[in-house]
Image (cartoon, rainbow, N blue to C red):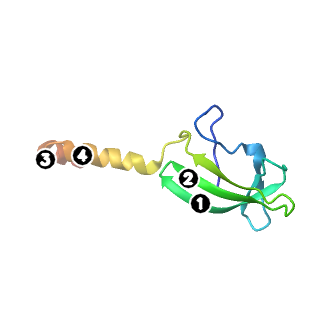
Amino acid sequence: MRLVTAKYRTNVILLPRTNLFRGEDQMILIKCKVCKGKAIVQARKELDVTMSQLYCSCKDPECGHTFVMDLCFSHTLSPSAQQHKDVVVSFLRALPDTERQMMLASL
């Protein structure tokens, strides 16, 4: 799983790239805001397709800070190849039958 964050959003707490660690067991670790140690994501609550809440806890037993961070979709860098297929199919369905047959015959 790869986390992508936006730089200048004020309405959500983001996960800066410098605060992420890869654990030995491939779990994503977060930097604790209080002690600056490693915190682990215990659970994730999906609010919608573009937004999730990460429930985190600090791994340092002397700190024990538990907190929630928001993870949100920022923007697309490269569109999905699946979207191209959907656009073509919807375009073909919108054509009259005769034009659709001519279009398919020319392929």
Using the numbered discs, state the Cα–Cα distance from disc 4 to disc 3 in whole angstroms.
9 Å
User: What kind of residue is marked 2?
Assistant: Ser
How packed is label 1: few (under 14 Cα within 10 Å), some, or many (20 or more)? some
Q: Is 101 situated above or below 77?
A: below
How packed is label 3: few (under 14 Cα within 10 Å), some, or many (20 or more)? few
Tag 2 secondary structure? strand
Residue pointed to by mark 3 = 97
As drawn, the residue found furthest toward the bottom would be: 25
First of labels 3, 1 by sequence position:
1
Residue pointed to by mark 2 = 52
How packed is label 4: few (under 14 Cα within 10 Å), some, or many (20 or more)? some
User: What residue sits 24% from the left and 46% below the top?
Assistant: 92
Cβ atoms at labels 1 and 2 below 8 Å apart: yes
Residue pointed to by mark 4 = 92
Using the numbered discs, state the Cα–Cα distance from disc 1 to disc 2 in whole angstroms.
7 Å
Using the numbered discs, state the Cα–Cα distance from disc 1 to disc 4 in whole angstroms.
40 Å
First of labels 1, 2 by sequence position:
1
First of labels 4, 3 by sequence position:
4
Residue 106 visible in this rendered orientation of the protein: no
Callout in the foreground (4, 2)? 2
Most foreground residue, 87 or 34: 34
Lateral position of residue 99 relative to residue 8, left or right: left
Cβ atoms at labels 1 and 4 below 8 Å apart: no
Residue pointed to by mark 1 = 44
Lateral position of residue 100 relative to residue 1, left or right: left
User: What kind of residue is marked 1?
Assistant: Arg
Using the numbered discs, state the Cα–Cα distance from disc 3 to disc 1 in whole angstroms.
48 Å
**Residue 17 locus on image (x, y percent):** 73, 44
